[in-house]
Image (cartoon, grey):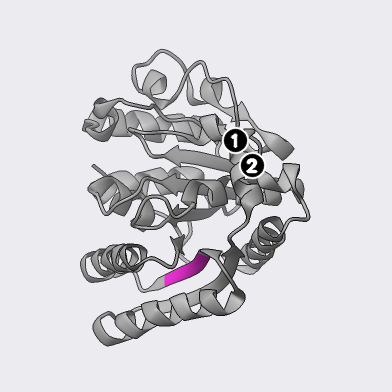
Amino acid sequence: MTSSKPVKVIAVTGGKGGVGKTNLSVNLGVYLSSLGRNVMLLDADLGLANVDVMLGLRVERNLKHVLNGECDLRDIVVTGPSGLKIIPASSGTQKMAELSPAEHAGIIRAFSDLGQNLDYLIVDTSAGITDNVVSFTRASQDILMVVCDEPTSITDAYALMKVLNRDHQIERFRIVANMVRSPQEGREIFAKLTKVTDKFLDVMLDYVGSVPFDENVRKAIKKQKPILELFPRTPASVAIKSVGKKIETWPIPMNASGHIEFFMERLVHQGAY
């Protein structure tokens, strides 16, 4: 049984590591789940997975075991806070970045057989502009680019957008400024990005908003709990909820097939790895 309704597939990426991408992915998933939405978070950092660690979840098996034929995809799905469903990847496994065509087909079958009636699939990519990152982002309907006020963050985000735009004709990116000292700083980061993209790329950037630097984020990560659960009224939580509310208003692209396996098929057909 496949999903009978459109699934919004959102890649959360950033080019650079350390911009708070995974934390945002997790908390957006928790927020959307708390609204009663059926949300699945795919840890797409196939070699250095950390979503399960961030949430303190005990994971016995992951995508590697599915590909090895040891279990089905439904056997590895774990449930996190607010009912968020998580597909854990493998950590420290080089093989996961070098999958064969047969293993690609196995992933497609696994997702097709899952039968989850999903509203959202959030894809937390790894850092950088590797083939892995490019493949997951281009296979998603919406790309949420996380940036912070560091020159390397802005240059790496631009580099990833350049590859996706010039090589794969992706024209729209949604931007979140993370760890900002003020809303004004968030808008300034967005202005820096648009100044470069307007000059060199044929893209449209959509400013989703900013998330302030908040000491409670670090406390929540240390306690392996989502900040929305541990500190629901802290400034970062309020801002993340605001981003989540905007996501709820995003239209499903006209070319979406409405089936979760469409995500995986696009991934494979476009030469994922």
Q: CA distance from mark 1 to mark 2?
A: 5 Å
State yes or no: residue 176 in magenta: yes
Local secondary structure at mark 2: helix
**Residue drawn 42% across and 33% down?**
49
- Residue 4 visible (yes or no): no
Name the residue that disc number 2 marks: 219
Please indicate whether residue 141 sits to the left or right of residue 251 in the image: left
Q: Nearer the viewer, residue 116 or 160?
A: 160
> Residue at 42% of width from left, 48% of height from top?
263
Q: Is residue 21 above or below residue 238?
A: above
- At label 1, the amino acid type is Lys
Looking at the image, do the residues carrying marks 1 and 2 touch, with CB atoms under 8 Å apart? Answer: yes
Circle on res. 59: none
Within 10 Å of the Cα at label 2, are there few (<14), some (14-19), or many (20+) other Cα atoms?
Answer: some
Q: Against 186, is 148 above or below? A: above
Q: Which contiguous range is marked in magenta?
A: 173-177
Comparing 183 with 203, the one in front is 183
Residue 24 spot, x, y in % from top left: 56, 52
Q: Which residue is the site of mark 1?
A: 222
Q: Is residue 74 visible?
A: yes
